[in-house]
Image: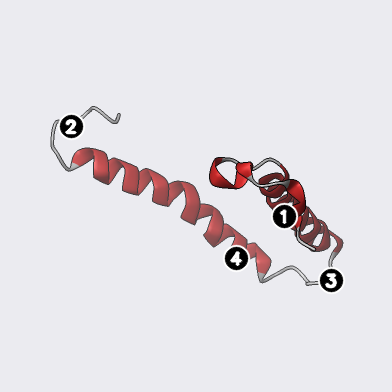
């Protein structure tokens, strides 16, 4: 079944809703299922937590150093703070 298979006004909304739900919630359910079986101090969970924290720090750093919009007009010294 494709996005253009049904010619109804509600079909694109239903398609996006179902496709979005399946793509995200299936991984969430698997994460909850397997996450309950892993010790919080295990090496793999520490690695996952470290990579997730590094990605968040990188995104925030990228937003501060290379901003867009109104923030791009301010100097880097003002964006970083005292």
Give the residue at x 53% y 61%: 29
Residue at the disc numbered 1: 78
Secondary structure of residue under mark 4: helix
Query: Residue 18, percent across and down?
Result: 34, 47
| CA distance for labels 2 and 1 | 53 Å
| CA distance for labels 2 and 4 | 35 Å
Is 4 left or right of 57, judged from the image as shown? left
Residue at the disc numbered 4: 33
Where residue 41 sits, quadrant-wise, is bottom right
Where residue 67 sits, quadrant-wise, is top right
Residue at the disc numbered 3: 41
Could one spot residue 26 in this view of the protein?
Answer: yes
Q: Identify which residue, 56 or 28, lies in the foreground.
A: 56
Q: Earlier in the sequence, mark 3 or mark 2?
A: 2
Q: Is residue 81 above or below residue 74?
A: below
Residue at the disc numbered 2: 6
| CA distance for labels 1 and 4 | 45 Å
Q: Earlier in the sequence, mark 1 or mark 4?
A: 4
Q: Quarter of the image containing the N terminus?
A: top left
- Depth-wise, is mark 2 or mark 1 nearer the camera? 1
Query: Residue 70, percent across and down?
Result: 55, 45
Q: Identify which residue, 62 or 73, lies in the foreground.
A: 73
Give the residue at x 29% y 41%: 15
């Amino acid at each position: 079944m494709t996005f253009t298979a049904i010619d109804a006004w509600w079909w694109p909304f239903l398609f996006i809703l179902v496709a979005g739900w399946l793509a995200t919630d299936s991984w969430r359910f698997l994460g909850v299922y397997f996450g309950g079986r892993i010790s919080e101090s295990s090496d793999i969970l520490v690695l996952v937590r470290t990579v997730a924290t590094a990605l968040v720090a990188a995104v925030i750093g990228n937003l501060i150093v290379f901003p867009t919009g109104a923030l791009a007009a301010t100097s880097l010294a003002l964006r970083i703070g005292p």
